[in-house]
Amino acid sequence: MAASARSFRELSLLLALALCSALASSVDGETSRRFWIENDAFWKDGEQFQIVGGDVHYFRIIPEYWKDRLLRAKALGLNTIQTYVPWNLHEPEPRSWEFRGFADIESYLKLAHELEMLVMLRVGPYICGEWDLGGFPPWLLTIEPALKLRSSDSAYLSLVERWWSVLLPKVAPLLYSNGGPIIMVQIENEFGSFGNDKRYLHNLVLLARRYLGNDVILYTTDGGTIGTLKNGSIPQDDVFAGQSGSAMIWDNMCMLI
């Protein structure tokens, strides 16, 4: 009887040790899940990483074909997709929010994750993208006095804040550090070809980090001239600068000094 009790205690101890080991491995695995930029290179989970990416926009594809299109992109050798987020799709009327069907961005991002694709999310608020008004809702043009779009105009920024206060909490759980596919988030788009309002860009950075956290990797994208890159980049806010119109095989990004 005593031997049986001792054997039971030993078995219980072994099971407890195995459980502790499994939990430790799980914690270590979560801890090592990290994407960052260092020494002009991308790093993922402790190893240098090359982004091979392209744009696959959820709002241009019927949801039934999302998986097919993502699998085709993966078959081409892509490991990362970019997608814009058009404001006018998700807020067609003031405070009228749409996240179903074509607009179900969360389902699209989760599908990309299931297919082991990473995501660079381009949240605007201006996206260009050969999309009506660059993604701006047309009702912005009806507001009086007229808004100064893509500027530090407080009335315009308050509406951007309202939009992002709905959008960004939806995507925050899908950041790479939270177990999702999103490795980087782009603010604005090719702003250096439009203006150089650094206060505007700074406000976007503050808004993005309020909802996504201070560790999120933010970046801008501009044309390849020195002038546009300087106008559209904000290295003082630790935002990385990328160049549009180039092949989406990225070994690194630049931070303009």
Image (cartoon, rainbow, N blue to C red):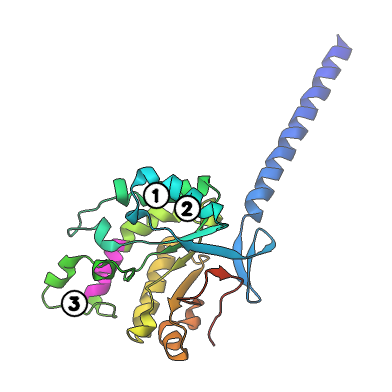
What number is the disc on residue 174?
Answer: 2
Drawn side of residue 166 relative to residue 119, left or right:
left
Is residue 110 visible to the viewer in this orientation of the structure?
Answer: no
Residue 255: percent from the left, percent from the top?
55, 81
Residue placed at 23% from the left, 58% from the top? 91
- Give the spatial CA distance, label 1 vs label 3: 30 Å
Say what amino acid the circle numbered 3 marks.
Leu
Is there a contact, CB below 8 Å, between mark 1 and mark 2? yes
Residue 137: percent from the left, percent from the top?
21, 65
Q: Earlier in the sequence, mark 3 or mark 2?
A: 3
2 or 85: nearer the eye? 85
Q: Earlier in the sequence, mark 1 or mark 3?
A: 1
Kind of element beneath mark 2: helix
Residue 97 part of the magenta segment: no
How many numbered circles are shown? 3
Drawn side of residue 245 relative to residue 21, left or right:
left
Q: Which residue is mark 3?
A: 147
Q: Which residues make up the magenta segment?
A: 155-163
Q: Which residue is mark 1?
A: 106
Residue placed at 37% from the left, 54% from the top? 58
Of labels 1 and 3, the one closer to you: 1
Q: Point out the residue furthest to the bottom here.
A: 227
Is there a contact, CB below 8 Å, between mark 1 and mark 3? no
- Give the spatial CA distance, label 1 vs label 2: 8 Å
Kind of element beneath mark 1: helix
Residue placed at 45% from the left, 82% from the top? 233
Is residue 15 visible to the viewer in this orientation of the structure?
Answer: yes
Residue 115: percent from the left, percent from the top?
53, 47
Say what amino acid the circle numbered 2 marks.
Leu
The picture quadrant where one finds residue 121 is bottom left
Say what amino acid the circle numbered 1 marks.
Glu
